[in-house]
Amino acid sequence: MTAAPDALISRPVAVADIPASGLEVTVEATEAERAEIARRFGTGPIDRLVGSFSLKGTSDRILVTGTVEAGLTQTCVVTLEPFPNTLREAVEVTFMSPAALEQWRAAHEVPEEGEPSAEDEPDEIVGGTIDLGIVTAEFFALGLDPYPRKPGAQFRYENSDEEKVSPFAVLKNLSKREDQ
């Protein structure tokens, strides 16, 4: 299987190579892959990106569990300073063969586009493989804090006026101006 054209990292695993007892797989992003992922997701440098996975199941259904961990630099939304941050995201994804996925869809009400679902739809096994590199990049993205804060950073609002003005006083003054 070739990686999806927009895949940031690709580590395909053939479903046929997964023994009945299961398979443990570690995906570690290269320096070039980490640089591209940082560029794509707008983070600072990523020092480490590792996915640790356990794969269990049959040729029709594979359950992937594990964690994605990263050490990266992010910019604090309060101080605008870069700071080192860590990410740890739990992974649980079910992959199904196209035939099994079709049966699953028939047995479950698949909501219209944009509607919430009670249960996540399994991912499809494509060409007899699952790509743990894509899983690693996706769960890295899911684990990113959209508003990262440097430890101890606090937003402080300071009013330049010497006296504190009540919001009710502002409303009262506003209604006086409208009466004039």
Image (cartoon, rainbow, N blue to C red):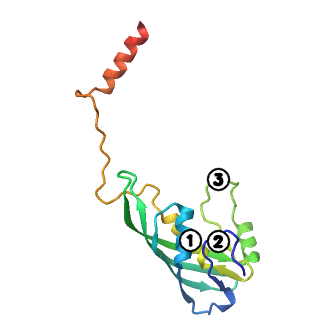
Q: Which residue type does callout 2 highlight? A: Ala
The vertical placement of 58 against 3, above or below, is: below
Q: Which residue is mark 2?
A: 7
User: Are the two marked residues, 2 and 1, in contact with CB atoms closer than 8 angstroms?
Assistant: yes
The numbered disc on residue 137 is 1
Using the image as rendered, state which of residue 177 and residue 150 is in the foreground: 150
Q: Which residue type does callout 3 highlight? A: Glu
The reply to whether residue 73 is visible in this rendering is yes
Q: Position of residue 44 (x, y in %)?
A: 46, 64
Gap between marks 2 and 3, in whole Å?
Answer: 26 Å
The answer to whether residue 141 is left or right of residue 153 is right
Q: Tell me the quadrant of the picture where the N terminus can be found.
A: bottom right
Using the image as rendered, state which of residue 179 and residue 148 is in the foreground: 148
Count the numbered circles shown. Answer: 3
Q: Tell me the quadrant of the picture where the C terminus can be found.
A: top left
Q: Secondary structure at mark 1?
A: helix
The vertical placement of 22 against 123, above or below, is: below
- Asked which quadrant contains residue 4, the reply is bottom right
Circle nearer the N terminus (2, 1): 2
Q: Secondary structure at mark 2?
A: loop
The vertical placement of 127 against 22, above or below, is: above
- How dense is the environment of label 2, judged by Cα within 10 Å: few (below 14), some, or many (20 and up)? some
Residue at (42% x, 66% y) in the render: 73
Q: Secondary structure at mark 3?
A: loop
Using the image as rendered, state which of residue 72 and residue 118 is in the foreground: 72
Q: Position of residue 144 (x, y in %)?
A: 48, 63
Q: Nearer the viewer's eye, disc 2 or disc 3?
A: 2
The vertical placement of 77 against 126, above or below, is: above
The numbered disc on residue 115 is 3
- Asked which quadrant contains residue 172, the reply is top left
